[in-house]
Amino acid sequence: MNPLQKLFPNIDDWSEIGRACIDTLLMLGGSLALTVLIGLPLGVLLYLTGKGQLRPMPKLYAIASLLVNILRSVPFIILMIVLMPVTYALVGTKLGIRGAIPPLVIGAAPFFARLVETALREVQQGVIEASQAMGASLWQIVRHVLLPEARGGLFAGITVTAIALVGYTAMGGAIGSGGLGDLAYRYGYLSYKSDYMLVTVVLLIVLVQLLQMIGDHIVTRYKQR
Amino acid sequence: MIRFVDVHKSYRVDGKDIPALQPFSLDIADGEVFGIIGLSGAGKSTLIRLINLLERPSGGHIFVGDTEMTALAEPALRAQRRQIGMIFQHFNLLASQTVADNVAFPLRLAGERDAHALRARVDELLARVGLTAHADKYPSQLSGGQKQRVGIARALANRPSILLCDEATSALDPQTTASVLELLAEINRELKLTIVLITHEMDVVRRVCDRVAVLDAGAIVERGAVADVFLHPQHPTTKRFVNEALPEEAASELAPFVRVPGRILRLSFRGDTTLTPALGRVARETGVEFNILAGRIDRIKDLPYGQLTLAMQGERVDAALAALREAGIEIEELRR
């Protein structure tokens, strides 16, 4: 008996854990990319249409803001279940990595959008005024002033969102989306195999820790300037 | 030429119109350095922002050259703004970009894509403001004076005909202020650029401006050539600004001279009369005696000037005064 088996008697197939790791990373990568892709423009919209900003539109802002708040207030596990028909319509399955991505994105994008809005508000008003004085168009201000000037805050937002997504993917296990959370739930919780629970939780902690370190590293690089 | 015609501005706060600038008209000539001085809240920030329409007037017309700014649609306005450089109290540089990229920014906004041409123009601009060695630094690595020089280089990038300075030296220490003002004067001379600056320091006006308007509670209360306004301030606000710039001037108030005999006069010399020995000559010729109570000799931009407060006694004081006036000296009689 090798020492690994002695420590974790219930785990006879480590490759299953390896596969779960990859699944989690795929879900995380796919959903994070789509979250940023959708959340960033949504955040810019919230920022621009807000009161006293570059294109104040109170009604549009109120609607977008309400939508964001609704999606943020529904617990993710409920959101996942409610969204099942939408998920099926979008990707043709409710299960697996593909089935997990739509609810993950719909859950995380509004959250990220708020973080984008906050980060953009940190950009000095004077810098925006200076670009207007130089004849910059709204698009040029967004593209060449707001986003670059806020990138420290934006990367911090991406880090926080990525970590929140790790938590969401783990919850996805409950409805059969695969990944580490799925293992922890099925083997660790439902079958009382606590060694499975331990290994998956440790792997999730390592993942979160890694994300935070990478995120912090990028943010400090930009914040120094 | 910048022209304001019956311009006024008010802000709407809680459904009420709060006036910021009373109706005024003003012409600023090509190539001059025009100062607008006022206390904070007097409306000078609003006034300077009317020129490039960062603030829209509530009424009236604003012309820059032959273009009526107030009649332009958005894209035309943006093109026009590229011809008007602006620098700011807090510099407003892009923190995420290097000095060179900050200076290149307005060129890129204007559509310049050729990396070679960009680099050449940026080098030229950085050389003008003396920052060639700092091209690859970030703004946070620079001192306040250096940041403002980057601001100036950036403002000049698109070869504007007008430069707006929004309290450009108010965040700087006196020495740095002097060097930035020198740079502005040099730019004005060499590029024939019209400069409009707002400030709350009379000293800034004295050093670089040709003409000045004094703003008090949203109204222009006094305007004219800097030498006239400076040597003969009329409005109380102007007097306060002038006294601030000349601490000795406080001594020329009459109170300390109660026991000084004779007539008390204030003599103002300008330009060449500052350099001629008129006072001694006239005293010799008319036999009057004089006693200097306070005085100062300095320059208003490039114009030397002097102002002396003195007590004069003798039989032929009136003849002396006439002779002095003859010599081009302005005389105010403070006490007969």
Image (cartoon, coloured by chain):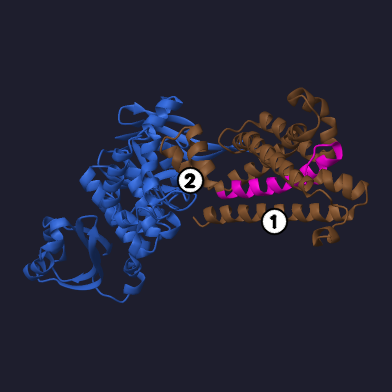
Chain colours: A brown, B blue
The answer to which of A74 and B320 lies nearer the viewer is A74
Horizontal placement of A77 versus B116: left or right? right
Local SS, label 1: helix
Q: Horizontal and vertical percent for residue B63?
A: 35, 30
- Mark on residue A209? 1
Q: Chain of mark 1?
A: A
The answer to which of B25 and B51 lies nearer the viewer is B51
User: Given the image, on which type of amino acid does mark 1 rest?
Assistant: Gln
Residue sitting farthest toward the top: A89
Same subunit, labels 2 and 1: the answer reads yes
Q: Chain of mark 2?
A: A
Label 1 Cα neighbours within 10 Å, binned few <14 / some 14-19 / many ≥20? few
Q: Horizontal and vertical percent for residue B9?
A: 49, 36
Q: Horizontal and vertical percent for residue A181?
A: 81, 45
Query: Of circles 2 and 1, which is in front?
Result: 1
- Magenta stretch: give its range: A152-180
- Mark on residue A127? 2
Tell me: residue A97, above or below residue A155: above
Tell me: residue B204, above or below residue B123: below
Is residue A221 located in the magenta-colored stretch of the structure? no
| Residue B15 visible, this angle | no
User: Given the image, on which type of amino acid does mark 2 rest?
Assistant: Val
| Number of numbered discs | 2
